[in-house]
Every structure is written in structure tokens, then in C-alpha cells.
Amino acid sequence: MKIIKHIGLGIFIIGLLIFTSLIFVGKYELTENTFDSFVKSKGLKSELFINDIQNNVVGKEYSNPFALSSDITSALENANKTYKKEQKWDKVIWDSPHELSYNLMKPSAKGLVVENQGLFFFLTFGLGIIGALMFIIPDVVLLGPAGIKNDGIYHNKSTNRGWIGWITAVYLVTFYIILYFFADYIVNLIYLVNPISKALSGNGASQWFLYGFLYCTVMTVMAVRMFIKYRHNKYQIIRTASVLFFQIGFAFLIPEILVRFNMPYFDFKNAWPLDYDFFFDWNIKSLINSGTLGIFMLVWGTIFSIIIIPIFVYFYGKRWYCSWVCGCGGLAETLGDPYRQLSDKSVKSWKIERYLIHAVLVFAIIMTAVTLYTFFSGVDSFFGIKTYEIQKVYGFLIGSIFAGVIGTGFYPVMGNRVWCRFGCPLAAYMGIVQRFKSRFRITTNGGQCISCGNCSTYCEQGIDVRSYAQKGQNIVRASCVGCGVCSAVCPRGVLKLENGPEEGRIQENPTLLGNDIDLMKMLKDK
Amino acid sequence: MEHVVIIGNGISGVTTARHVRKMSDKKITIISDETDYFFSRTALMYVYMGHMPFENTQPYENWFWKKNRIDLVKNRVEKIDSTNKKLLLKDGSEMSYDKLVLATGSSPNKFGWKGQELDGVSGMYSKQDLDTIEKYTKNIQRAVIVGGGLIGIELAEMLLSRNIPVTFLVREMNFWGNVLPKEESQIIANHIREHHVDLRLNTELKEIVSDENGRVKAIITTKNETIDCQFVGLTAGVSPNIGFIQDSEIECNRGILINRHLETNIPDVYAIGDCAEQENAIGRRRPIEQVWYTGRMMGETVAQTICGNRTEYKPGHWFNSAKFFDIEYQTYGWVTSRIQEDELDYYWEAPCGKKAIHVVFDKNNREFVGINTFGIRLRHEMFDRWLNEKRSVEHVLEYLKDANFDPEFYKQHEEEIIEGFNKKFGTNIQTKRKSWKRIFTTF
Ligand SMILES: Cc1cc2nc3c(=O)[nH]c(=O)nc-3n(C[C@H](O)[C@H](O)[C@H](O)COP(=O)(O)OP(=O)(O)OC[C@H]3O[C@@H](n4cnc5c(N)ncnc54)[C@H](O)[C@@H]3O)c2cc1C
Ligand code: SF4
């Protein structure tokens, strides 16, 4: 069994190495035809750029994506510089350089990968999946009888913030930066999933399709790990199945299929303000222009965010969303599960968390307000805040850097809920409801706590669960996502996630059971 | 300002300090030479197993002590001069006190076995023990554990987590047989064997054999079997730490003798936790109670007394919990290894053999006496209340669903449990649906 595990790890690493190295193989050639039709379809007026590309790039064969990307982007920047100086604004190209270069490079790729999409899909995704499953499935036997198996987590360099963890973090961060900002470098990788995209939506794959597919794949494989690890715990199994279902069905398949039928791409379970561009004018317009279904989507999205979300939080706590439905939560609970113990539990980090997450919420609200003001009034700024600018800043800082690069990239060093804990505005909003108006709490079982600290250690949200449990106090915290792992790892059966009457949920003066009743009363009165 | 000195920074001493601080402005000093800060002894196993780093066993962050003006002194008390209210410390310095709390805990029993001081032989109690175990269990072929209590089974689990084969010697015929009824012992013994532990019941240690370097190389049992091993864990119970007290005026038996107010024979000197021994046992409790909870409860009580509110130690209903590998155990009230003469009992076990419930009640008035539960979590508060209200066993079973504390979606067994009871005793109990209202109408 151990051998299978090791071979699996080897196969996985080979798959990962091939995946990574594909960036460097293949050839690129921008043909006359491709370029002409691109210029036409975009209506480009930048003669400098067009000439530059035609003279220096078109027809030339590049052996790696970086040189081609660099030629295109510098041509663009040079042309723009000149026109800006001459104040010929209509000739300036406003697209971001790497986006434009991506659009030119996608059809220019040729060679090994593009010609053997199926084969390379197998060598990357295929090997990765097979290897990972060979690594994971033997645990059914290796872990022994079902139960909490956290042996060696703090001895393992990948899960104790050791060197493997750091390398993983660097890899993930790099991946996210390329994905968000340099998609033109990974055209080859996008071709890997091109056939799948075509089959689903009828269109070729984009970097977002690649990301979505990868996301679902990773979640599925790591969900298998969760099913094995927690096979004695029905709450964990159902919850994991639920996030997987919502990710694959609602976030991935349904939107792709909608596109196939010429409908707007729409994720029915996404909610503002996590879905920060829901109220952006292009989104509203595109929905309004898509007939009844589009209008329904607009209404649904609004009602979902503003009415359904808080009502459900009232009844079940924010867990119903964060660890049963949400995509970010889904990745955190599957891929991120091995890293949950790395979240900082200090009072200081709790303080930082509160400032940061509420600041993001305020930022999201202001941005949305400005956006809607612009939408209805037509004025493109509000008290000097330029709508387009604030959207751009939010999208870059929060949408890309915080949610993606830091949020997921830092799993192996800061725990798996960095984004959900410090950044997500939807989590902040639901947290306020959960803290002040909800039936959800984690009940502490009388006096049974032995202060061992397992619960705090494995809280992905950095809640010092023990500090409540050892006082006999229920845990009512804005940040709790109700993953249920504290309850699972507690060796003394102290913690239970419950939805019960609001009355008595928050205990200002808790007492521990055990001592004589009079003394307990006295301790309570103090 | 009155100076309260506490010897021992375990749960008992620290609880005392915290509560004294809550109620007063007294100067508080805690002396211990084990670790810089309070840590949870019960979590030592998880450090070895890699579930937690050692820092995570510390329930309070390091700034806590200064902020609450609790002075921590890392030193060992060698002598108590109760006439002059002075302590002599290991480094030669002295410290005077106005109130002294002895919370010195206990140490592993060593019954004078030949070879018990060899390298590679250790108890499992202190941080130092943990370090020793860490040091002597690297790359070994087999370990032997002597003594089948809760700490022994934890040690077995620890060693197995590092793939070290374990032989487990247990004196009793049944595992933890002085506490658990036979049925439960059987479940646990099966489970231990399921984890591939070489469990030897009814077997004792005779001698530990040394190699040429003074390190253990084997043990010999009372059945004269020799078992090769490179590590021996001694977990045959613990005894109060009273060595340095014995030549003082403070009266000791096996532990430091105290009355119901936790006072020793010397004024202003108290003893609590593992090291204390009640002159007269309280109810069915043992005179020396070596559990986390009682240490904490005595700390809460003695703090009242120290702050001028002389309070009797009145522990409520007995409860306890433990985990045997993957099987959790909780108990409320009294279920003794041999059911008493005036009691009846009912035992239910799930087909999987990993869940069980054992209920004991009074033969004559059917009052509920206690419950053991394996693999099913129960709500402490409900049992505390039922015991206070002296409810009948029928009442408890009827409302058993209120007391279920398992995570959501877990399979529930109340119906089967009660069906079995009805069959055995010819009753007709019907389970009531869980009611929040009942659960939350409390004192
Ligand atoms: C491995 C293990 C697991 C356990 N699990 C459980 C469990 O699950 N549930 C449960 O209820 N109980 C459990 N226990 C028992 C529980 O931990 C003890 O009952 C409890 O810790 C006792 O606390 P205490 O404060 O009385 O003493 P201790 O925690 O022993 O603290 C006493 C301190 O005093 C120090 N000291 C002693 N003499 C001196 C001196 N002369 N000068 C200075 N310092 C001194 C000692 O070094 C020690 O640090 C477990 C014990 C062990 C060892
Ligand atoms: S895991 Fe359980 S026993 Fe340990 S500190 Fe948390 S609540 Fe207490």
C-alpha cells in the first residue's frame, strides 16, 4: 500500500512537471490572416502598432511565448506612448497589453501541444489525477480504523510550514499571477482543455475555463481525500459532497451550458458582494438585454444576496453558504484541508482580521454604490471618485490579488481560509448577521473540556475555540464558517454545532459544570 | 498586600490563580520547575503524534500572565517552613507567603522493579517525560507498556502513530477492569487489538533487562516470558508529589491530607488537585482524585476561601471522559466495574461493536444512578440536571434524545436502545422527540 502511495506521488509530480513545462514548448506564429481579422474585429486605428506588428512579428516563428508576448506588448506600448504625446486619443489602444497579446497568441500557437491536445491532456491532467488518487486511496487501509487521523501533520514539511509548504506557496502564487495577469504565457495550457470547452459551450477555452476546469478537478480529487479521512463523520461527508455539487454544477457546468444556448454566463449561487461585479453596468446591461431569463437572473441575484442569504444565516449560520455552497469555501475545504492548522490563533490576528475584513466590506459597498449611481444617473464619478477607477482598483486589489494570489496562494503558510477570514466581504456581511441575529452556535458540553487545544489548532478560521470551551461558553463568532472540524477533532465530545433558540445563545457569564451549584452561581455572579 | 503563593502550574494551581485574580488584588506567585508556562498535560500525546506543536498545548498566550499580574517563578520548592511561612527554593533563595496552595500534582508509579531507572524507561506524565520518550523511541523495534489505565493506552496510541510495535502488559483480567464493567472492557480490548497492539491481560512486569550500555534491551514478565524491546513505558498509575513536604509539619498520608475546605492541618496552607487526599472520601468518590476536572473544581473552590469566602468543596455529580484510540467514552453519575447489590443495569451495544451504552439504576426506587457511553456523545447538562432531580431511569430513557450530543446527521440509536430496555424489563417506554425548550429550561 505504501508503495502504491509513493508511486502515486511520483506520477503526480511527473504530471505536474509536464504541465508546468508545457509553457516552454511549441511554436507560435502570427499569420497575416489572423492579424488582419483581429484588427478588423477590434476596429484598431493605431497605425503605428499595426505596422510594427506587420513588419516585425507577422510571419515570424517564435519558439516560446515570452518573446512573442514581449514583441506585441512593447509594440503596443510604443505606439500608445507616441499617440498619447501627440494627444491623438482615438488611436490609443486601451486594452491591457497582456490581454491583447493573449488574443493574438491564442490563435498563433502551434506545434506539439496544439496538435496533440488529447495526449497532453492525459499527460498532465490524466497523470495528475491518477497519481493523486493513487496517493490518496491507499489511506483507506493505511489510516487504520476510521477516526481522527492527524498523525504527523506537524512533522511533515508540507503541512508544518516547512520547505515543501513554502515551495508549494511560491508555485501557487506564481500560477495565480500568470493566470490573472499573463494569460498569454499559458496559451498551451489552455489548449489542453480546449476540446472540453468546445463540447460544453461550443467555444474554445479561455484562461477562465482552464481555471474553472482545474478548480473542479482539484476539488474532486481532494474531496475523495476528505471522504476517506472523515469516513466516520457524516457531517463532513455530506458537507463535502455539497460544496462539490455546487462547484461542479452551479459554478462550472450551468454557466457553460447557458452560454451554449446563447444565454448570459451566470452562476446562480454566487452572491454580491463576493460577486463584486454583479452590479457593474456591463453585467446589468447584458442581463437586461437577455430577455426574460436575463431579467430573472438579475432579480434572483439581487434577492439572493439581500434577502435569502441573511435569512438562511439566521436559521443555520453562515456555514450554509461558506462550507456548503461557496466555491472559495469549497476549494478551502478540499485542497486547503491539509493546511487548516496553519491559521494564526492569536488575539492579535483576530484584531487584524476584524479591521481588514470590514474594511473590504466597506470598500465593496462604496464601490457598488458609486457604480449604481453612475448606472442610474449616467454621471461617471461620484464625489470625485471615478467609477471606472474604483472598479479597477477593487478588481485588481481585492478581486485578483487578495482573493486569488494571497487567498489561495498562501494556503500552505497561512492556512486555508486566508481570503474567507481576512478578505471576503460576503463573509463579513454574513458574519455580522451570524454574530447578532442567528440561531447558530457551537455548544460547549458542560465541563468536559480538558483544554487540549485540538479544536483551536484545527480551526481554519483562527478562532481560539478552546478559550471558550474551557470556560464552558458557547462559541458565537462572526467568522465561524461551521466546518465542524473542531467538533470532529475534540477527543472529549465537547463541541456541537447547533441551530437552536436565540435565547441564551450568547452567554455573558458562562460557568463550567462540575462544581456544586451554589458555587457555580457565585462564580457566575462575579 | 497579601501574598498568595501557589506551588505547581498545572490546571489546579492556575485555576486558583485566575480566580483569585478575578476576585481580588492580592499578589499572586506560581512556582513550578516543569515549564515556563501552563500547558495542558492531557495534550502531551498530541505533540508526540504530530497533531499539535507544543505551544498549542498552552491554553493562554504568553502575555496573559503579566497582564493579569500573575508572577511566574521557574524554580523548585525544596522545603516548606510553615512556622515562619517561608519556602526554600532549589537555587537557595527564600520566598515568604501569606497563603500557600499546594498543587504539586503527581508522578508515575514505579514499584521498585529491577531496571526501572535504565535509559529507555520512562513514565508519561511531564514535559520532561515527553522529551525522554521522544529521545528513546527513535528507530526502535518494539516498545513495552506496563499498566493498563488511561495513560497507558494513550502511550500505546502515541507509539503506534510512529509505527512502533507495542506490547501492552495489563495486570487485570479485563482492560481498565477496576473502573469499567466487563462488557466495556471487552469493547476496548477488541479495539486495542484491532490497532495491532499485542495486548497481554493478566500479565505483569517482573524485571527490566539492561544491555551493556545501561539501556533497556528486554523485559521479563511474571510469566517468565522475555520480550525484546528498546523502550519501556511505565503507566501503572500515579502518586501524589509529596516528597519535599514529608519532612514539614504538613500532614500527609498517600497524598496531602485535607478537609472538606481543602485546608491542611496547618493554617493558611491548602492542597488541591492530584496531590491532595480527602481525610474522608466524598460520597462514592476516591479520596485522591487524579483527574483534570476535579483539579479545576478544587481550584475554583480554594480561590473563594483565599479571598475571604470560606467555601466547602462540594463537587457535583461525577463525570469523566476519555478516548481509547478511535472510541470516545463519557460517563455521568456512577457506573462501577461491578454493579452494586442494590442496583440494576442495562447494557446496549451496536452491531459494529464500537458504540455502547450502559445504564445503572436503583433496584428499589428505579432512580437513575449513572451511564457509560461509548461512541455516542451525551449532553452533560441534561445528565447533571436529571441527577439533581433524581429522575427515574424511565424518565431518562424517555427523554434520551434531548441528551444526544453527536454531530448533526449522525445515526441515532435511541429507539434501539429503548426497545432493548423495554424487552429486558417489560416496560413500555416511548421516546420523546428532542425538544429545545426542555434542553434550555435550566436553573
Ligand atoms: C498523559 C496524561 C493524560 C491525561 N488525560 C486526562 C484526561 O483525559 N482527563 C482527565 O481528567 N485527566 C487526565 N489526566 C490527569 C490530569 O492531567 C491531572 O489530573 C491534572 O493535570 C493534575 O493537575 P494538577 O494541577 O493537580 O497537577 P500537575 O498538572 O501535575 O501540576 C503540578 C506541577 O507542579 C510542579 N511541582 C511539583 N512539585 C514541585 C515543587 N516542589 N516545586 C515546584 N514545582 C513543583 C510539577 O512539576 C507540575 O508542573 C492526564 C494525565 C496525563 C499525564
Ligand atoms: S478539543 Fe475539546 S477538549 Fe480539547 S480544548 Fe477543544 S473543546 Fe476542549
Image (cartoon, coloured by chain):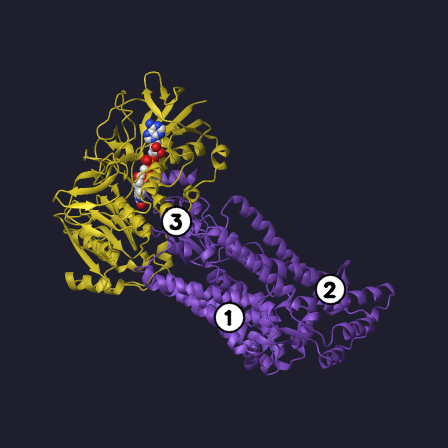
- The crowd level at tag 3 (other Cα within 10 Å; few <14, some 14-19, many 20+) is many
Give me the disc on residue A124: 1
Give me the disc on residue B50: 3
Where is residue A120? Give x, y as percent.
52, 74
Image quadrant holding the C terminus of chain A, namely top left
Question: Which tint was used for chain A?
Answer: purple
Question: Which tint was used for chain B?
Answer: yellow
Where is residue B33? Give x, y as percent.
38, 30
Image quadrant holding the N terminus of chain A, namely bottom left
Q: Element under label 1?
A: helix
Q: Residue at x 58, y 62 (%)?
A: A175
Check the residue under mark 1 and report the chain it is in. A
Check disc 3 and give the amino acid type. Answer: Gly
The answer to whether the beta carbon of the residue marked 2 is less than 8 Å from any atom of ligand 2 is no
Check disc 1 and give the amino acid type. Answer: Thr
Q: Are discs 3 and 1 both within one chain?
A: no
**Left or right, residue B176 beside residue B36:** left
| Image quadrant, ligand 1 | top left
Do labels 3 and 1 touch, CB within 8 Å? no
Number of the front mark, 2 or 3? 3
Q: Is residue A455 above or below residue A262?
A: above
Which mark is first along the chain, 2 or 1?
A: 1
**Left or right, residue A305 beside residue B250:** right
Give me the disc on residue A388: 2
